[in-house]
Amino acid sequence: MEQTIPVQSIDIPLLIERAKEARKLIIDMASAPTGCHIGGSLSVIDLLVGAYARYYGDPDTVIILSKGHAAAALYATLHVYGIIPDNPTDSYGEEGSLFTGHPNHKLPGIPFATGSLGHGIPYAAGWALAQKMKGTKGLGIVIGGDGELQEGLCWETAQIVQAQSITNFVYIVDCNGGQNDGYVEDISPIRNLRQRFEAFGFVVKEIDGHQLEDIVASIEPHPERPVAILARTIKGKGVAALEGNPESHYAKIPKKLAYRWKVGLS
């Protein structure tokens, strides 16, 4: 039975509060002994909160975080929705903990482990193709990064999606402009992104990746073509000291600083 939540019935103020609570959890995970990929986790959190608000609970649909280094954001999202009851900040990164540095498929709500960039995109496309063959209304929804688009596997999957007419596929790109070693623009620029996806037959939507109302409205399949959502985001969103700074890619911070950042969240 399809359990997708209609846009008009979603409580946007509640999602905003959930996203803020999730950001606090991410900051706490950055204060764990191992630290975490805080910048990209803070940029992607609104996209995750919006996607799970719309589609979690539909047994035929998967939501996959392909930029798996942002696992802290995924764990935080699953916790604020009650999908994972245990608070990830209690044991994140510890030896033997299920809250590993990349998504752990042994946890509820995580269908595939991801980590090597580019691999979550074909997972989602394969799921979508299987649902198409079974005749369900299920979707393959994947959230990746703009730096990740430097992986050839992303574009190989786009070719297969086009060739197999996989229209129940939604590819959300967290376009925060940064990657491990600096700005995407300085390392391997990915220009004309809309035109690139359109050349592979995608319907392309461009949104503000921090406006939850726009996010939940945009995550819709198209009846005839796959969908690519280019979500413009800010790396380190919510923490003034981190916003737009590629050096925020990974951080290990003191508890006192974590407290100040949580209090000052925007």
Image (cartoon, rainbow, N blue to C red):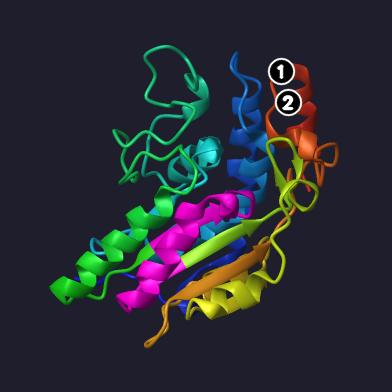
Which residue is more in the foreground, 126 or 104? Answer: 126
Query: Residue 160, relative to residue 104: is it above or below?
Result: below
- SS type, badge 2: helix
**Residue lying farthest to the right in this orientation:** 241
Q: Quadrant of residue 142?
A: bottom left
According to the image, label 2 marks what residue? 258
Q: Is residue 132 visible?
A: yes
Q: Is residue 166 visible?
A: no
Query: Residue 3, relative to residue 234: is it above or below?
Result: below
CA distance separating discs 1 and 2: 5 Å
Identify residue type, mark 2.
Answer: Ala
Mark 2 closeness class: few <14, some 14–19, many ≥20 residues within 10 Å: many
| Magenta residues, start to end | 141-170
State the residue at coordinates (44%, 26%): 100
**In the shown orientation, is residue 7 left or right of residue 211?**
left
Q: Is residue 75 magenta?
A: no
**In the shown orientation, is residue 200 left or right of residue 3?**
right
Identify residue type, mark 1.
Answer: Lys
Q: Are marks 1 and 2 in contact (CB under 8 Å)?
A: yes
State the residue at coordinates (38%, 88%): 224
The location of residue 109, given as percent across then percent down, is 34, 46
The location of residue 118, given as percent across then percent down, is 47, 49
According to the image, label 1 marks what residue? 255
The location of residue 260, given as percent across then percent down, is 80, 28
Q: Quadrant of residue 261?
A: top right
The location of residue 137, given as percent across then percent down, is 25, 76
**In the shown orientation, is residue 149 left or right of residue 255?**
left
Quadrant including the N terminus: bottom left
- SS type, badge 1: helix
